[in-house]
């Protein structure tokens, strides 16, 4: 028995079968909610604009200049290639880049047309193109109506209602407030004619699309910054992850607009990248050109001085020995010049690095000055690379971003190492320079032994050779730099251009909308039904009783709206009367099963007042009397007697009077108008009802009744309020516990369940009163031993079904299907 009640406690947690039947019974709510949700989804779908996605594909390559070979002495590839992909992604989403694209395409102009439900973007489909005068301000957000009168002329119409508006100058991006006229503006123009108004300045040029006279077009100018912000949301996918291939995509309602923007964005990015790439070479060429100019003037002056000296001293010549001295000293002078130039570069580079923090492309390449140390070149390259990364980060990050500090730390670390390397290189160069100077001094000592005129000629020739050599070196490097710049190509390579191939539609996804409508239309009523079911604390059907208790249900009594409680007497052919007859038969079956002989005592009780306990007592006693069995109905609800009012009998004397010895059994027994039925009322309300029921006189009272009657029906108090009813167990053969549908709370059964589990009460059965099988719970209830008989005003046993229309027949068929479904769940 304990295990059985443990199972019941688990089942009490949630009745899934009952919940499922509850859902079935509320099917109209589901139909209505799904219908409403489906209509809303349809309403939104037909009013949504079609959304397209256009895309193109590029690759960011490290295209090495074909003129960079092992023999090339110039290198401009600062910054490496590792961050080029990330740089491209940042630039494509940057404000400055998208400003250039929007400005070039003039995407701040909307071309619109009124559709059935909304304005449609018809960019690329109009017979005109707006040419905006960017030097003048344009009124923002105002619809301009264009209606063609023929293929060359159109009418411009603008509705004004006074007040003020905001205008923007697309050249300066400044916005200013302007007053608006109160009257509408309308005027006819020809294509190509300028429209010069205080609030608009543009002209419409032919686009090649044929004009349709009478057709209406709309133009609107938008905020430049708002448009740029919208296109900065371009989607960029790096596929596969970590590769140099980028897929760019945009979504919108006009495919032509998306295609033009994607292609223009990539083209402008490639142009910008190439300009940036050429900037290194341009800076280098500028440096070489300035050096060549200086050397050219210097060489010209020395040439003039040499020619003049030879003209004045034509007899002086230079022998082979002197020429070898000149060649040697010229070579040493070139070495000296090179060493001094390299030392000067180190000094300039150190000054530059110590005085600035934004290192850029204005650092001359070390190879220009003949510096080939790998550590120096690598360090300078790393500094510029990190500086470029810092500059890119400034597009998207705030100055407080910790990444800036990390980059500065790395740059300072490289600078520290570079300064040490440069200091070591300068020391070596100074040593080499001193050695060259010593050799030059020795050679000059030999030359001083020559005649004075030859020494002068030797000096001029020496200076000329030195200048000519330096000029030749710079001229060679200038030629190399020009070739490198001309051969430069962009690292941005287009794999697939954006193109309208007829597809690309991604929304609205009507299928998903309808599915979500069905889901939403199901979930909402499901939640409502769940809340109703979950918070319904009252018993609604026999299955709930079965789930909550192991006590069997003996029968069910239908609803009664009759004025009199004596239903079995006033309306003996009613379904309720038949239900009590069925209850009587079920009790007879129980008595036979228990092999009881003689008078039978039936106790009728309930949880609380109002559940129909007295109603069941009166009618059960009446139905036993109608079977010609001597029956007595005893009112033992001593605290709240009611029976006397239903039989119109005086309550002067009753059980209380007998138990205290004031009256005899004959004196308190009253006959009713129903044959074979006597009634013993409770009498006056005593101060100690429990003690009276437990007295020895109560045993005598019950023995007297058993001698005189076949059936004794005891109308006892509710067990949920007092314990009087349970103090009569020794006299009871059967107990009927009355439960009222949708009135008795589920928790009220705990008391009787506990006593039944402890075997304090036996031979007890439930009677479900005021029962309707058509309740919202959707349960059916039929004839059988476990539940006894179930009749009520819902029964059709005494009624002839009436013919109905198609709707009624359909309703009856649905009820049959629902009953079948309920029976399947019962099984």
Image: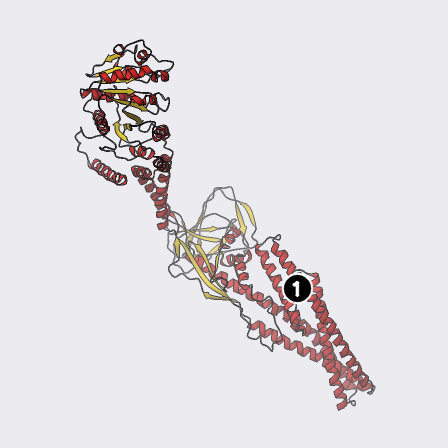
Q: Is residue 674 left or right of residue 315?
A: left
Q: Decide if residue 550 is in sight here.
A: yes
Work out whether residue 304 or residue 826 is closer to the camera in this orientation and state it.
826
Given residues 127 and 801, the one toward you in this image is 801
In the rendered image, which residue does mark 1 sit on? 414
In this rendering, does residue 205 appear at all?
Answer: no
Q: Dividing the picture into quarters, in which one does residue 356 lie?
A: bottom right
Left or right side of 107 for 67: right
Residue name at image x 54 percent, y 50 percent = 168
x and y, in percent, of residue 205 in the image: 45, 58
Q: Does 132 appear above or below 592?
A: below
Residue 668 is situated, as x and y percent measured from the top left of the image, at 27, 11
> x, y (%) of residue 699?
30, 17
| Helix, strand or loop status at disc 1 | helix
User: Where's the N terminus, which quadrant?
Assistant: top left
Q: Is residue 466 above or below residue 1?
A: below
């Amino acid at each position: 028995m304990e295990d059985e009640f443990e199972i019941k406690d688990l089942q009490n947690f949630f009745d899934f079968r009952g919940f499922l039947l509850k859902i079935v019974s509320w099917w109209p709510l589901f139909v209505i909610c799904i219908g409403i949700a489906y209509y809303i989804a349809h309403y939104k779908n037909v009013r949504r604009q079609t959304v397209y996605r256009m895309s193109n594909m590029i690759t960011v390559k490290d295209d090495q200049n074909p003129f960079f070979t092992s023999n090339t002495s110039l290198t401009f590839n600062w910054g490496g290639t590792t961050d080029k992909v990330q740089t491209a992604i940042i630039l494509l989403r940057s404000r400055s880049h998208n400003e250039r694209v929007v400005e070039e395409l003039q995407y701040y102009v909307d071309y619109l047309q009124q559709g059935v439900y909304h304005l449609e973007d018809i960019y690329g489909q109009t017979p005109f193109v707006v040419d905006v005068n960017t030097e003048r301000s344009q009124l923002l957000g105002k619809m301009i109506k264009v209606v063609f009168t023929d293929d060359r002329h159109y009418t411009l119409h603008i509705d004004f209602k006074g007040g003020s508006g905001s205008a923007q100058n697309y050249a300066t991006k400044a916005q200013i407030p302007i007053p608006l006229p109160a009257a509408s503006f309308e005027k006819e123009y020809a294509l190509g004619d300028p429209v010069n108004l205080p609030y608009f300045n543009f002209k419409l040029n032919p686009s090649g699309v044929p004009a349709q006279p009478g057709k209406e077009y709309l133009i609107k100018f938008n905020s430049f910054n708002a448009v740029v912000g919208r296109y900065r949301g371009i989607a960029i996918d790096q596929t596969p992850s970590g590769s140099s291939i980028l897929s760019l995509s945009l979504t919108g309602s006009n495919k032509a607009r998306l295609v033009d923007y994607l292609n223009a964005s990539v083209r402008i990015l490639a142009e910008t990248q190439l300009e940036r790439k050429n900037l290194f070479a341009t800076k280098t060429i500028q440096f070489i050109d300035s050096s060549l100019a200086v050397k050219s003037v210097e060489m010209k002056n020395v040439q003039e001085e040499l020619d003049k000296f030879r003209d004045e001293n034509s007899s002086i010549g230079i022998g082979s020995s002197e020429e070898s001295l000149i060649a040697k000293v010229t070579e040493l002078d070139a070495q000296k010049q090179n060493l001094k130039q390299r030392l000067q570069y180190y000094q300039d580079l150190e000054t530059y690095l110590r005085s600035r923090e934004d290192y850029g492309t204005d650092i001359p390449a070390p190879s220009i000055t003949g510096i080939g140390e790998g550590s120096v070149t690598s360090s300078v390259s790393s500094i510029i690379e990190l500086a470029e990364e810092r500059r890119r980060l400034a597009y998207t990050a705030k100055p407080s971003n910790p990444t800036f500090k990390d980059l500065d730390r790395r740059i300072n670390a490289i600078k520290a190492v570079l300064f040490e390397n440069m200091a070591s290189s300068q020391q070596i160069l100074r040593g080499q320079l001193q050695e060259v100077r010593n050799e030059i001094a020795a050679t000059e000592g030999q030359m001083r032994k020559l005649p004075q005129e030859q020494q002068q000629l030797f000096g001029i020739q020496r200076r000329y050779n030195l200048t000519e050599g330096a000029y030749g070196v710079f001229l060679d490097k200038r030629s190399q730099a020009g070739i490198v710049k001309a051969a430069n190509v962009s690292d941005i390579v287009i794999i697939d251009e954006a193109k309208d191939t007829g597809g690309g539609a991604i929304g609205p996804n009507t299928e998903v909308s309808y599915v979500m409508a069905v889901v939403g239309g199901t979930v909402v009523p499901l939640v409502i039904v769940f809340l109703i079911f979950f918070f319904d604390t009252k018993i609604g059907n026999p299955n709930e009783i079965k789930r909550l208790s192991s006590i069997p249900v003996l029968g069910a009594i239908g609803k009664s709206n009759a004025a009199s409680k004596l239903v079995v007497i006033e309306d003996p052919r009613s379904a309720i009367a038949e239900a009590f007859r069925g209850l009587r038969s079920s009790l007879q079956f129980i008595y036979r099963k228990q092999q009881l002989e003689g008078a039978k005592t039936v106790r009728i009780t309930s949880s609380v007042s109002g559940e129909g306990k007295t109603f069941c007592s009166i009618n059960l006693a009446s139905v036993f009397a109608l079977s010609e069995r001597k029956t007595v109905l005893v009112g033992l609800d001593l605290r709240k007697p009611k029976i006397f009012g239903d039989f119109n009998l005086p309550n002067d004397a009753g059980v209380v009077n007998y138990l205290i010895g004031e009256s005899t059994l004959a004196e308190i027994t009253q006959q009713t108008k129903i044959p074979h039925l006597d009634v013993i009322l409770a009498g006056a309300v005593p101060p100690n009802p429990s003690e009276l029921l437990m007295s020895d006189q109560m045993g005598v009272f019950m023995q007297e009744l058993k001698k005189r009657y076949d059936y004794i029906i005891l109308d006892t108090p509710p067990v949920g309020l007092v314990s009087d009813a349970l103090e009569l167990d020794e006299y009871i053969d059967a107990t009927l516990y009355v439960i009222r549908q949708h009135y008795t709370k589920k928790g009220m059964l705990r008391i009787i369940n506990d006593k039944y589990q402890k075997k304090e009460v036996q031979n007890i059965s439930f009677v479900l009163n005021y029962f309707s099988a058509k309740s919202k719970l959707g349960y059916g209830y039929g004839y059988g031993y476990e539940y006894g008989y179930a009749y009520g005003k819902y029964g059709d046993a005494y009624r002839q079904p009436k013919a109905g229309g198609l709707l009624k027949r359909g309703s009856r068929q649905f009820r049959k299907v629902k009953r079948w479904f309920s029976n399947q769940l019962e099984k």
